[in-house]
Image (cartoon, rainbow, N blue to C red):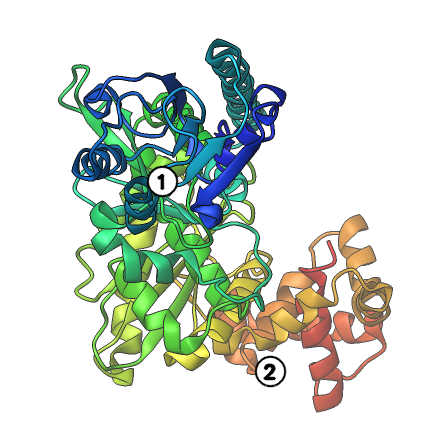
Amino acid sequence: MEQGTITVAEALALPALRRGLPEVLVGGDALRRPLRWVHAGEAPNIAALLKGGELLLTTGLGLGSRPAEQRAFVRGLADRGIAALVVELGARFTTLPAAVVDTARSCALPLVQLHREVPFVAVTEEIHTELVNAHYALLRRAEDVHRRCTEVLLGGGGVPELLRLFADFAGNPVFLETPDGRLLYAAGPPTPPAEPGSADPLQVWAGLRASAAGLPGSVIADIPGGPAGGTDAVRARLVVLPVHGAPAPVHRIAADRAAGLLAVVLMRARQEEELAARGRGDFLTDLAEGRLDAADAAAQARVLGFRPGPGPLLPVVTRTADDLVPAESWAVLAASLQEELAGVGAPVLLGVRLPEGRVPLLVGLRAEKDRPAVADRVAAALRAGAERAGFRPPVVVVGAPATWETAGAGLRYAAGAAEAAEAVEAGGTPWYDVRRLDVDVLLWRLRSHGDLAAFVQRVIGPLLAHDAASRPALLPTLEAYLAHAGRKAETARELHLNRQTLYDRLGRIGRLLGTDLEDPEAVLALGLALRARRHVG
């Protein structure tokens, strides 16, 4: 039964009709048809007065006396799409004519005869009351969803959170699209992955949206406020596709109300760009976390506009240097980055992940040898886009070339490396090669482990204590010495020291730490301790 209606079976079970001893002659398997209204009448042409969905009460006076008239009467009602025909025996017929019964059967029209007289006015009043109550319950349910959506927005949520709530309510995937059919965001109900029919929303979009206009049961609600202005201007469309079941009337009412909320949210500048970027970010995160099958990933990426060639994919992750980014700034950042990346000469799929404050990308390479040059251009575009949007220079980590089977793992590792790289003071490095961050990633993952801080204190603690109390600081000398692999001449040049001063400082460092700076094992421990210090505070 659809929400907000009663069925033929429920109407027959009401006291007013039950007193008439109803007998179902035809269409017992169709008694779950919803009723829109109930009507009583005896006119031969009564079908012309009906709109469909009615339960028609009659004593049979309009049926006619000839079989041809009776067949035409019943066929006209069926063509109108009424829910059921109820004939009261006694005034006109003691038994219904075969022509009536046979025609109802051939038209699949439920036919009921009443063996006892009942006041039709009492029947109509009782059914109308049930219909009004059901419709009121429907409106209350739609209002409840509207209230929950409003609470999501007032609580700091945005369009993605609202669409996920609506998809949960509708039990079907929900999409936000531009008036010309470009996908902005997709959300699905929280169906367990192993459950049959739990296709990813992007798969649904790719397979069904092309035919959505003719897909029975689709719900499409226009969101007003397009750039053209006026009451007829459409900014976007909310689409519910009937994958797990046909939407009920309550879903259509709720969709119209949700469209009003979405119109208000989308009034913010560049909101559509942010939504599209967040949708791509969700896809890339699902890929990174293994929630997507590699065989489906390429097709879903095409839905999002990413069409790389046969060459390798390049995972890239960038993190903003700003700790707290206002939600409205992400729209500006996403648009600015997208505009800058349009000139890198390679296909790019860019997304944003607001919870983690990062921007994942996939870049299509023609060949693996192009990686350094493409990485330079992508990093420059990301930095330029961030600066134009008012952000500080971001950390950019470039992963190893990958296929669709390995791109997810590459994105996942690059995301961790980006967080580790934020602690690395590299003096304006345009981008970090993920393959040179392996040690930092390992140390960053151990940052909360007490042994790491103890290791730092044990290996270079005396040097840190010296620098906190005395000048000149010796830690920069040790860092430069290790960076140049113990080559004293190069270390002296970088620090602008003469040889003797450098030798004196290295001697003091060795005595403070009780170690030999020429010993490879000691040098390894010192290098690790210096890098670990960046991650333990």
Where is 44 relative to 94, above or below?
above
**Dot 2 or dot 1, earlier in sequence:** 1
Q: Determine the residue positioned at 47% across, 72% down.
A: 408
Nearer to us in this view, 129 or 199: 129
Q: Is residue 395 visible?
A: no
Question: Which mark is drawn over residue 274?
Answer: 1
In the displayed structure, 444 sits above or below 471; it is: below
Q: Nearer the viewer, mark 2 or mark 1?
A: 1
Looking at this view, is 164 or 468 the one in front? 164
Q: Quadrant of residue 73?
A: top left
Give residue 486's mark: 2
- Residue 293 is situated, as x and y percent measured from the top left of the image, at 45, 74
Q: Where is residue 397? Give x, y as percent.
A: 45, 65
Q: Residue at x 68, y 62 (%)?
A: 475
Q: Between 102 and 506, which is closer to the camera in this rendering?
A: 102
What is the three-letter code of the residue carrying label 2?
Answer: Gly
| Label total for image | 2
- Image quadrant assignment for residue 83: top left
